[in-house]
Image: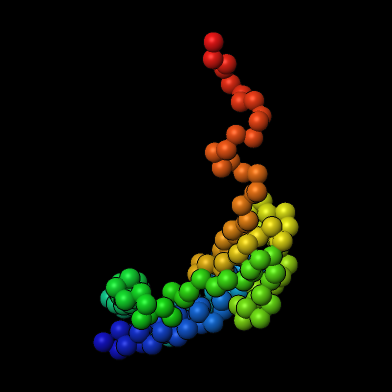
């Protein structure tokens, strides 16, 4: 039973740590952060099992972590408004082409990272973006202004391409 209690305490601590680190996706982690997360696994193993190398200890520890993960997922699905802190909320980081510097600072997101993400998604200028949202998984969604001359169903006088009717 001691392993289960230790697993719960360590799970809660790891959850808090990963929330504090921010919304980086795996591909955006620095080398140090990646090494830190890998080493953390080994450090946690000793703390949870207290060097218990039995199969029973391993099953209890992994089972407890799994049950807690599933429970948090279910709780956030069941009461999404009340338990927003479990998954976090999307945050608007750019509006009308202007970066929201306080929000960027709060989320520890560099302006250069915002520009890079926009470029990777085919956005040439931030001024073309109506709104950019930092999603809960660390990705950034960009919504650009609609083109004034877009396909709105009106005939602009240009000939249609394709086969001509006889």
Nearer to us in this view, 55 or 124: 124
Above-or-below relation of 144 to 154: below
- The C terminus is located in which quarter? top right
Above-or-below relation of 107 to 98: below
Q: Position of residue 164 (x, y in %)?
A: 57, 16
The total of numbered circles placed on residues is 0
> Is the image coloured rainbow, by chain, by secondary structure, or in one colour?
rainbow
Residue at 73% x, 67% y: name it: 112
- Residue 22: quadrant of the picture: bottom right
Q: Where is residue 155 in the image (x, y as percent from the top left)?
A: 60, 34
135 left or right of 10? right
Q: Position of residue 66 (x, y in %)?
A: 33, 72
Residue at 51% x, 71% y: name it: 90
- Residue 72: quadrant of the picture: bottom left
Residue at 61% x, 52% y: name it: 146
Q: From this viewpoint, which residue is outermost toward the top?
A: 166
Nearer to us in this view, 96 or 84: 96
Residue at 51% x, 82% y: name it: 17
61 left or right of 15? left
Q: Position of residue 158 (x, y in %)?
A: 66, 29
Q: Can residue 54 be seen in this view?
A: no
- The N terminus is located in which quarter? bottom left
Q: Is residue 135 visible?
A: yes
Nearer to us in this view, 92 or 42: 92
- Residue 34: quadrant of the picture: bottom right
């Amino acid at each position: 039973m001691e392993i289960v209690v230790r697993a719960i305490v360590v799970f809660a601590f790891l959850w808090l740590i990963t929330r504090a680190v921010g919304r980086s996706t795996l591909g955006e982690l620095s080398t140090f952060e990646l090494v830190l997360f890998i080493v953390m696994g080994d450090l946690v193993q000793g703390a949870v099992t207290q060097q218990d190398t039995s199969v029973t200890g391993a099953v209890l520890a992994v089972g407890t972590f799994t049950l807690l993960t599933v429970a948090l997922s279910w709780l956030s699905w069941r009461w999404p408004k009340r338990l927003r802190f479990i998954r976090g909320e999307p945050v608007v980081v750019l509006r009308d082409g202007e970066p929201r510097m306080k929000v960027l600072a709060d989320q520890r997101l560099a302006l250069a990272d915002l520009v890079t993400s926009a470029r990777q998604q085919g956005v040439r200028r931030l001024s073309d973006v109506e709104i950019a949202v930092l999603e809960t998984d660390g990705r950034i969604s960009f919504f650009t202004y609609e083109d004034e001359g877009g396909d709105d169903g009106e005939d602009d006088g240009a000939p249609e391409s394709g086969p001509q009717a006889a």
